[in-house]
Image (cartoon, helix red, strand yellow):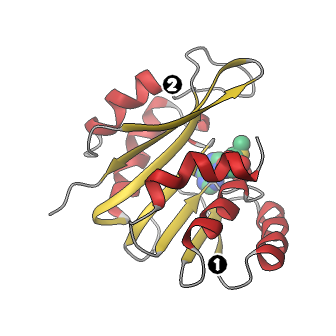
Amino acid sequence: MDHNDHVALLRAGVVGAGPLWADFGSGWGAFTLALADLLGPGGMIYSLDRKRDELQRQARELRRRFPHVAVHYLIADYREPLDLPAFDGIVMANTLHYLTAAELQATLPLVHGYLRPGGRLVVVEYDVEEGTFWLPYPLSWRRWQSVAPAAGFSTPRLLATRPSGRNRGFYAALCERPPA
Ligand SMILES: C[S@@+](CC[C@H](N)C(=O)[O-])C[C@H]1O[C@@H](n2cnc3c(N)ncnc32)[C@H](O)[C@@H]1O
């Protein structure tokens, strides 16, 4: 996948939501860059990962390619409660598959709590059912459709898919914190 694929996966979930977004588990920033592209000047992104070197790498790239988008970099573990503003949207791309079922169940309410009422959660994941070393706890599209509502989100809507060499590919899905 390249930058255009990342933008295409997020586009329908991001456009029209508001300017304040977060990317949790942002890594080297593939989807932070896509968010910056979609939000444009006036956008503000909190980019969060537990790996400092990944954030440093993405900060260089963000500054070079999207200097007019404000980005806050946070070295943090999103399984812990964090002091954050109420976001219009949060992206979690290729990161929830590291959480056990119990961790997922404990973390999703935190994520829910960081969204303003009506705020959006865009999840990008591999659509696979069987775990591997690299993908220990896969969050298939089928599984996400039952896990998200159980955590208080609206029923997820499939936004886009992209093929991947080894499996059924990636999906992007949107759900919301229901309006108050
Ligand atoms: C496979 S990378 C995906 C990076 C990026 N979202 C992407 O799609 O290109 C997974 C990232 O999630 C981060 N991560 C995993 N668990 C995390 C946690 N509990 N808190 C913060 N970051 C986490 C890892 O450090 C890693 O950078």
The answer to which of 54 and 2 lies nearer the viewer is: 2
From the viewer's perspective, is 120 left or right of 40? left
Q: Mark 2 points at which residue?
A: 140
The residue lying at 73 percent from left, 76 percent from top is: 66
Q: Is residue 110 above or below residue 65?
A: above
The N terminus sits in image quarter: top right
Residue found at the very far top of the displayed protein: 130
Q: In which quarter of the image is residue 49?
A: bottom right
From the viewer's perspective, is 2 left or right of 105? right
What is the spatial separation of the Cα atoms under label 2 and label 1, in whole angstroms? 30 Å
Q: Quadrant of residue 67?
A: bottom right
Q: In this view, does 77 lie above or below 168?
A: below
Q: Is residue 46 above or below residue 13?
A: below
From the viewer's perspective, is 24 left or right of 60? left
User: Which SS class for mark 2?
Assistant: loop
- Residue 139 screen position, x and y as percent: 52, 29
The residue lying at 74 percent from left, 53 percent from top is: 3
Q: Residue 17 carries which label?
A: none
User: Which SS class for mark 1?
Assistant: strand
Q: Mark 1 points at which residue?
A: 71
In terms of sequence position, does the residue under pointer 2 or pointer 1 come before the other? 1
Q: In which quarter of the image is residue 142?
A: top left
- Residue 11 screen position, x and y as percent: 53, 54
Is residue 79 something one can see in this rendering?
Answer: no
The answer to which of 101 and 119 lies nearer the viewer is: 119
